[in-house]
Amino acid sequence: MSDVTHLTPDLAVSPQLRPEDMAGLARAGFRVVINNRPDGESEDQPDHRTMEEAARAAGLAYHYQPVVASEIDDDDARRFAELIRQQPGPVLAFCRTGNRCGKLWERARTLNP
């Protein structure tokens, strides 16, 4: 499983996950996965449908919110915050490096401190 960084007790971020990581996330106590990486960003990246199937097979809820890092806006941040708020926690969000997920969380915090 990739490196996981906890931003809060109920939110963590990580770099790109693989389908085979999902069972380990469930065993680690995560209940929800948010994929912030658009399909096709790189050739070696699994598409979101493959990731969703693996997450659901592991008993995890899965949400696909593709965001381009250089184009993150307030609407993206609000949607990310709402996804987290609606979930039964703990949530793991991932993208290529984990940074864009962290930026979404930071921006959401500035909108709703």
Image (spheres, rainbow, N blue to C red):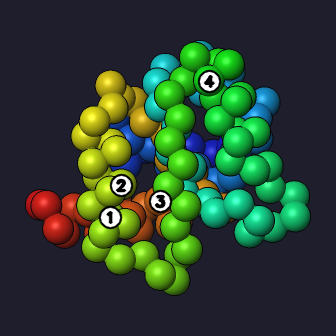
Q: Which residue is mark 1?
A: 77
Q: Are marks 1 and 2 in contact (CB under 8 Å)?
A: yes
Say which label, 2 or 3, has the lower sequence index. 2
Q: Residue at x 28, y 73 (%)?
A: 74
Residue 37 location, x and y as percent?
61, 60
How packed mark 3 is, by other alpha carbons closer than 10 Å (few <14, some 14-19, many 20 or more), is many
SS for callout 4: helix
Marks 2 and 3 sit apart, C-alpha to C-alpha, by 9 Å
Could you tell whether 78 is left or right of 36 in the image? left
For the question of whether residue 1 can be seen, the reply is no
Marks 4 and 2 sit apart, C-alpha to C-alpha, by 20 Å
Say which label, 4 or 2, has the lower sequence index. 4
**Amino acid type, callout 1:** Ala
**Amino acid type, callout 4:** Arg
**Amino acid type, callout 3:** Cys
Q: Which residue is mark 4?
A: 56
Disc tally is: 4
SS for callout 3: helix
Q: Which residue is mark 3?
A: 101
Q: Are marks 4 and 3 in contact (CB under 8 Å)?
A: no
Residue 56 location, x and y as percent?
62, 23
- The image quadrant of residue 105 is bottom left
In this view, the mark in front (3 or 1): 1
How packed mark 1 is, by other alpha carbons closer than 10 Å (few <14, some 14-19, many 20 or more), is many
Q: Residue at x 68, y 19 (%)?
A: 57
**Amino acid type, callout 2:** Phe
Task: Give the residue furthest to the right.
Answer: 43
